[in-house]
């Protein structure tokens, strides 16, 4: 069972079936979809399938998806997930934050805590994140939390009718502060 973890302002907790409509309402936004890898449109059915997949992901240790909740308001604002590559003992950081909550430091705060979780609780050797080149805000978050730019995968994903470059950021446990 995934235990909730906290930061100063946030609670990172497992998803519940009751979160489906909130996630769908927040994440079904073209502005989010254009710079992330989540489906668009993000239907209630797709969100439900995703949340229902969590028990298997967690049981197998394949991924740790957390709902990002502002503690003071008990408001779900996004997701923070670390996907595990067991063969190479590394994790992929993936997240989205609802548009109304951009620019408030929530992604940075939650990402820092997930790095700590990945290195100190999961004992990973490396954590990395793919960021669409046009997603300048996420690239900034990666640098703020200590990940280094490692390279660009040219036209790596086909998204909304366009091939998009993906920048790779990463950090090793031995260089993590």
Image (cartoon, rainbow, N blue to C red):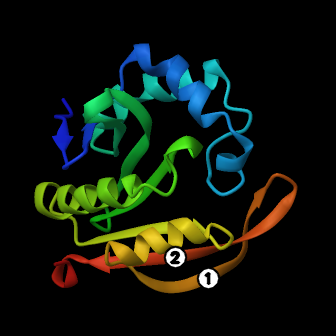
Task: Give residue 120's quadrant in the image.
Answer: bottom left
30 in relation to 146, above or below? above
Category of crowding for the residue at label 1, using alpha-carbon neighbours closer than 10 angstroms: few (below 14), some (14–19), many (at least 20):
some
Give the image location of residue 68, x and y in percent: 36, 39
Q: Nearer the viewer, residue 59 or 128?
A: 128
Is mark 1 in CB contact (under 8 Å) with mark 2? yes
Q: Quadrant of the C terminus?
A: bottom left
The residue at the point 63 percent across, 18 percent down is 45
SS at badge 2 = strand
Category of crowding for the residue at label 2, using alpha-carbon neighbours closer than 10 angstroms: few (below 14), some (14–19), many (at least 20):
many
Instruction: Return the residue at label 2.
Output: 168
Left or right of 134, for residue 63: left
Give the image location of residue 170, x and y in percent: 39, 77
User: In this rendering, does residue 14 appear at all?
Assistant: no
The residue at the point 52 percent across, 76 percent down is 168
Residue projecting furthest to the right:
161
Instruction: Return the residue at label 1.
Output: 152
Left or right of 86, for residue 129: right
Give the number of callouts: 2
């Amino acid at each position: 069972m995934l235990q909730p973890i906290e930061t100063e302002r946030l609670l990172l907790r497992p998803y519940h079936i009751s979160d489906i409509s909130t996630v769908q309402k927040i994440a079904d936004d073209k502005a989010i979809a254009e710079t992330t890898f989540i489906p668009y449109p993000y239907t209630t059915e797709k969100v439900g399938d995703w949340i229902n997949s969590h028990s298997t992901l967690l049981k197998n240790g394949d991924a740790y998806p957390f709902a990002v909740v502002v503690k003071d308001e008990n408001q779900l604002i996004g997701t923070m997930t670390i996907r595990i590559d067991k063969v190479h003992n590394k994790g992929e950081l993936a997240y989205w934050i609802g548009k109304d909550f951009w620019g408030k430091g929530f992604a940075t705060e939650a990402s820092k805590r997930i790095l700590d979780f990945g290195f100190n609780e999961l004992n990973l050797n490396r954590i990395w994140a793919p960021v669409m080149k046009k997603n300048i805000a996420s690239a900034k978050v990666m640098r703020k939390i200590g990940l280094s730019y490692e390279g660009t995968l040219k036209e790596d994903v086909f998204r909304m009718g366009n091939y998009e470059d993906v920048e790779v950021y990463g950090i090793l446990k031995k260089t993590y502060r």
